[in-house]
C-alpha cells in the first residue's frame, strides 16, 4: 500500500467518526426542537425545559439581568428554537460535504488519485462551501438581531458613562477563499485526469 493510500485510509476513518458526530448532532437538534415545541404546545413551565432565561452572554462576559429587565422565558425559547431550526440545514450540509470527502478518499484508497469523480466532488464541495458560508453568515446576523431586540441591548447598557450603543454586523468572508481553493483544486485534478486518460490511451 502506497503512502497516499495509507493516508487516505486514515483520513477516511477520521471523517467517518466526524460523520457519526454530525448525525448525532442533527438528531440532538431535532429532539431539542421537539422538546421546545412540546413545551409551547402543552404550555409547560419554561423552567421545566431550561434555565438561564435572565442571563445574557456576550463573548467572554455573562450578565445576570434584573427581573424587570429580563425578557420573558418564552421569548428566549423562541430565539433558541429559531437558531436550532436554522442550524439544521447547516448540519445537513456538513453531512453532504463529509460524504463527498469520503467519496474522494474512497477512490484514493484504491490507488486512483486522478479518478474522474474527484474533480466533480471538489466542485460540489466548492459550491457547498459557498452556500454554507452564506447561510452561516445569515444565521449569525439573524441571531444578533433577535438577541439585540429581545434583550434590548441598545438600551440595556446606556448609563451616565455609556451614552450610545451600536450593534455591528460582521460578515466572515473566509468561505469565499475556501471555495476558491476547492474550485482551483478541482481544475488541477481535472487536468490530472486528462493526462491520466491520455497516458492510458497511449499504453
Image (cartoon, rainbow, N blue to C red):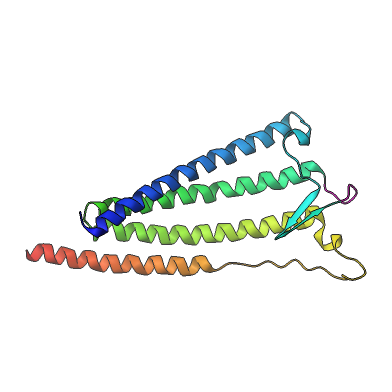
Where the C terminus falls, by quadrant?
bottom left
54 and 184: which one is in front?
A: 54
Relative to 105, say whether 186 is above or below: below
Relative to 92, say whether 196 is above or below: below
At a point 66% along the width and 47% down the height, the residue shown is 82
Is 69 colored magenta in this rendering? Answer: yes
Q: Quadrant of residue 117?
A: bottom left
The main secondary structure of the magenta stretch is loop
Locate residue 42, reporting x and y percent: 74, 28
74 and 48: which one is in front?
A: 48
Outermost residue toward the top in this view: 42
Relative to 170, say whether 33 is above or below: above
Circle count: 0
Please give left or right for residue 157 compared with residue 102 in the image: right
The magenta segment = 66-71
101 and 191: which one is in front?
A: 101
Outermost residue toward the left in this view: 203
Locate residue 161, reporting x and y percent: 89, 71
Is 91 colored magenta in this rendering? Answer: no
Locate residue 122, reporting x and y percent: 36, 60
At a point 37% along the width and 52% down the height, the residue shown is 100
At a point 84% along the width and 51% down the height, the residue shown is 65
At a point 52% along the width and 48% down the height, the residue shown is 91
Locate residue 37, reporting x and y percent: 68, 35
Q: Quadrant of residue 182?
A: bottom left
Amino acid at each position: 500500500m502506497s503512502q497516499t493510500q495509507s493516508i487516505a485510509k486514515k483520513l477516511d476513518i477520521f471523517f467517518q467518526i466526524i460523520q457519526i458526530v454530525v448525525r448525532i448532532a442533527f438528531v440532538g437538534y431535532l429532539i431539542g426542537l421537539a422538546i421546545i415545541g412540546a413545551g409551547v404546545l402543552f404550555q409547560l413551565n419554561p423552567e421545566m425545559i431550561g434555565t438561564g432565561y435572565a442571563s445574557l452572554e456576550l463573548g467572554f462576559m455573562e450578565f445576570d439581568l434584573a427581573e424587570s429587565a429580563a425578557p420573558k422565558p418564552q421569548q428566549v425559547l423562541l430565539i433558541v428554537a429559531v437558531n436550532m431550526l436554522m442550524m439544521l440545514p447547516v448540519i445537513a450540509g456538513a453531512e453532504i460535504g463529509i460524504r463527498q470527502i469520503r467519496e474522494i478518499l474512497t477512490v484514493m484508497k484504491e490507488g486512483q488519485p486522478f479518478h474522474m469523480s474527484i474533480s466533480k466532488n471538489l466542485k460540489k464541495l466548492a459550491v457547498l462551501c459557498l452556500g454554507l458560508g452564506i447561510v452561516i453568515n445569515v444565521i449569525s446576523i439573524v441571531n444578533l438581531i433577535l438577541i439585540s431586540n429581545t434583550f434590548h441591548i441598545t438600551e440595556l447598557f446606556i448609563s451616565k458613562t455609556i451614552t450610545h450603543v451600536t450593534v455591528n454586523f460582521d460578515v466572515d468572508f473566509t468561505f469565499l477563499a475556501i471555495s476558491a481553493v476547492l474550485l482551483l483544486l478541482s481544475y488541477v485534478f481535472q487536468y490530472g485526469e486528462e493526462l491520466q486518460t491520455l497516458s492510458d490511451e497511449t499504453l
